[in-house]
Amino acid sequence: MSTVDRRMAARANQRAAAFIRFQQLGDHEAMHFLLTDAGESEHARLAFITALASIAGTVARTAMGHEGALAYLQSVAENSAALSDADDIDGFFDQG
């Protein structure tokens, strides 16, 4: 890995960590800035998404254990697939 690649990976990790922090704080302006900044190029977007997924995976495994994290992510994928194909997606959220 070259120095340039290492710097880009470090920047992506920094952006991803900041994005998660600002999301937890509800700082939508900062999140928007980070997403705009991370979208400067196709490579920057891919690096940001990869870093975000890596952090999320680590947090999930720490919080739920390996099997719990896998089960949770499978549930998210299945529910998201059902929602994306739903004729009335809003109906899923209106139920309470």
Image (cartoon, rainbow, N blue to C red):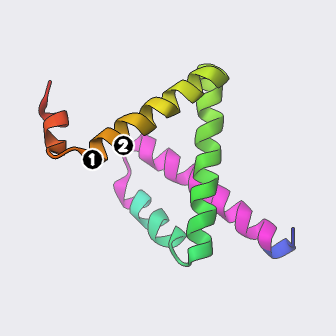
Q: Quadrant of residue 49?
A: bottom right
Q: Amino acid at mark 1?
A: Asp
- The region drawn magenta spans 5-29
Is 72 placed left or right of 2 in the picture?
left
Question: Within 10 Å of the Cα at label 2, are there few (<14), some (14-19), or many (20+) other Cα atoms?
Answer: few
Q: Position of residue 31 (x, y in %)?
A: 42, 57
Whether residue 25 is situated above or below residue 71 in the rendered picture: below
- CB of mark 2 within 8 Å of CB of mark 1? yes
Circle 1 Cα neighbour tier, 10 Å, few/some/many (<14 / 14–19 / ≥20): few
What is the tally of numbered marks visible in this picture?
2
In the image, residue 89 lies at what x, y percent? 19, 44
Quadrant the C terminus occupies: top left
Which secondary structure type mostly characterizes the magenta part of the structure?
Answer: helix
Answer with left or right where residue 46 lies relative to residue 77. right
Q: Which mark is residue 85?
A: 1
Which residue is depicted at the point 87% across and 72% down? 2
